[in-house]
Amino acid sequence: MTNGHCLCGAVAYSVSGAPIWSGHCHCNSCRRNSGAAVASYVAFANDDFRVTTGQMSEYESSPGVKRYFCNRCGTPMAFRADKYPTEVHLFLGSLVNPQDFPAQFEVFCADKLPWLSIDNDIKRYETLPPA
Ligand SMILES: [Zn+2]
Ligand SMILES: [Zn+2]
């Protein structure tokens, strides 16, 4: 159980239940959306997630993929894809306690910035993990 909010506080959410996974994504879309060298997410079940303050705005970045953000301060907050219909992927940095969700893997390493290395012993995939 945890909660999170955007930079300005206009949008906040709470989560009950355990995370499904935590990981970094190096794909170009997540990099551009986050503005950071790598985007980090924690996945929870949709049923465990609820927005408690304000409302997230959404943008469909590719067919079946939606990215959610605060339309006041611009903080990226969540990701959903038709491919993962029961999950919401929250931006790690929007949680109040990101330190409690260590990444278990990196995906889309094929797109990783060549000078970036995450120096710990986690799984790495060129694109997505095998189904
Ligand atoms: Zn905000
Ligand atoms: Zn990505």
Image (cartoon, rainbow, N blue to C red):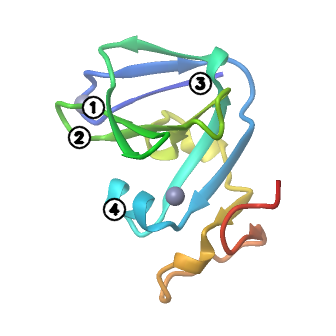
Q: Is disc 3 placed on a helix, strand or loop? A: strand
How far across and how far down the image is residue 83, in percent?
64, 41
**Mark 1 highlights which residue?**
70
**Mark 4–mark 2 contact, CB under 8 Å?**
no
Amino acid type indicated by mark 1: Cys
Q: Report the residue at 59% width, 79% height from top.
A: 110
**Mark 3 highlights which residue?**
2
**Mark 2–mark 1 contact, CB under 8 Å?**
yes
Looking at marks 1 and 3 on the same chain, the residue that comes earlier in the sequence is marked by 3
> In screen coordinates, is 119 left or right of 31?
right
> In screen coordinates, is 76 left or right of 92?
left
How far across and how far down the image is residue 96, in percent?
48, 33
Q: Is mark 1 within 8 Å of ligand 1?
A: yes
How far across and how far down the image is residue 122, in percent?
77, 67
Looking at marks 1 and 4 on the same chain, the residue that comes earlier in the sequence is marked by 4
Is 79 drawn above or below residue 124 in the view shown? Answer: above
Residue that extends furthest to the front in the rendered view of this protein = 63
Looking at marks 4 and 3 on the same chain, the residue that comes earlier in the sequence is marked by 3
Q: Report the residue at 58% width, 36% height from top.
A: 82
* Camera-nearest label, 4 or 3: 4
Gap between marks 4 and 2, in whole Å? 13 Å
**Mark 4 highlights which residue?**
32
Q: Report the residue at 66% width, 44% height from top.
A: 101
Amino acid type indicated by mark 4: Arg
Q: Is disc 1 placed on a helix, strand or loop? A: loop
* Camera-nearest label, 4 or 2: 4
* Camera-nearest label, 2 or 3: 2
**Mark 2 highlights which residue?**
74
Q: Is disc 2 placed on a helix, strand or loop? A: loop
How far across and how far down the image is residue 7, in percent?
28, 36
**Mark 2–mark 3 contact, CB under 8 Å?**
no
